[in-house]
Amino acid sequence: MAGKPKLYYFNGRGRMETIRWLLAAAGIEFEEQFFETREELLKLRQDGALLFQQVPMVEIDGMKMVQTRAILNYIAWKHNLYGKDVKERALIDMYVEATMDLNEIIMHHPLQPPEAKAKHLATIIEKATTRYFPVYEKALKDHGQDFLVGNRFSRADVQLLETILMAEECKPDILSKFPVLQAFKARISNIPTIKKFLQPGSQRKPPLDVKLLPKVLSIFNI
Ligand SMILES: N[C@@H](CCC(=O)N[C@@H](CS[C@H](CC=O)c1ccccc1)C(=O)NCC(=O)O)C(=O)O
């Protein structure tokens, strides 16, 4: 039996956070190898551990997986969080690709220069409340079920909850016009594996501390 998955990244959310969420939701314990300096990233490269010289990298089932979506797809498929057939998977893919689009904007917020922050935040709020959240609100309202797809817990529920919580960090009342999403958030947050991940002391990471920004920028040579 392979050991626990091992995640290689800096000690922050970035692109690795959704992977942490999905492993935790699936009840899979994982280890983390944080790097603090660019030299540590370069060493991983020199060791040939990074297929495209980038992280996230996850050692799982004898593989050194890279590319966030590939890693997420593998975990979801392996732990039956990807629907019951190809059509449910197609719907799940549409929903999660959209959550990742919104996540991408949100995760880059801390990297914005001070003079661009207000406008960038306004964009996050506008996209979340006019393009993305109305779709999920309607989907849940129309089929009247507990979960987004096939009335069964899937990665779509996990990734939407992660995105909702990140959006609320940007604007605490961002769900004020989405009562069905408010109920969805409470319901999915109460799933035991997710409830545990939301407890203090779990491997869930906080929003990027602005004091850590210079370190992240130097690690990735941005
Ligand atoms: N397609 C791939 C892309 C993976 C990817 O962009 N990895 C990056 C670190 S994460 C990034 C760092 C700043 O951009 C970040 C950090 C914080 C927030 C958002 C992004 C990397 O390794 N940069 C070194 C290099 O590209 O030489 C995947 O989905 O896995």
Image: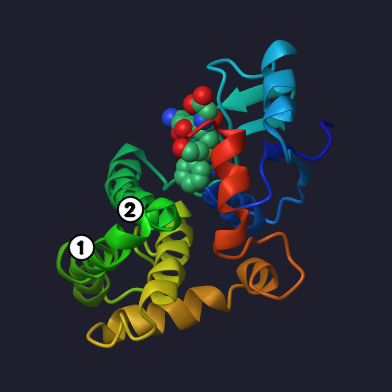
- Residue 16, horizontal then vertical, whole percent: 57, 45
1 or 2: tag closer to the N-terminus? 2
Q: Are marks 1 and 2 in contact (CB under 8 Å)?
A: yes
Q: Which residue is mark 2?
A: 105
- Residue 18, horizontal then vertical, whole percent: 52, 51
- Residue 35, horizontal then vertical, whole percent: 73, 38
Q: Which mark is residue 127?
A: 1
Residue 218 vs residue 192, the one in the foreground: 218
Q: Is the shortest distance between ligand 1 and the CB of mark 1 under 8 Å? A: no
| Secondary element at tag 2 | helix
| Secondary element at tag 1 | helix
From the viewer's perspective, is residue 5 above or below residue 208?
above
Q: Is residue 59 left or right of residue 79?
A: right
Q: Looking at the picture, which amino acid does disc 1 mark?
A: Lys
Q: Residue at x 44, y 67 (%)?
A: 166
Q: Looking at the picture, which amino acid does disc 2 mark?
A: Ile
Q: Is the shortest distance between ligand 1 and the CB of mark 2 under 8 Å? A: no
As drawn, the residue found furthest toward the front would be 115
Q: Residue at x 28, y 88 (%)?
A: 176
Q: Residue at x 40, y 62 (%)?
A: 160
Q: Is residue 98 left or right of residue 82?
A: left
Q: Residue at x 23, y 77 (%)?
A: 141
- Residue 106, horizontal then vertical, whole percent: 37, 58
- Where residue 167 sits, quadrant-wise, is bottom left
Colour scheme in the image?
A: rainbow
Do we see residue 160 in this rendering? yes
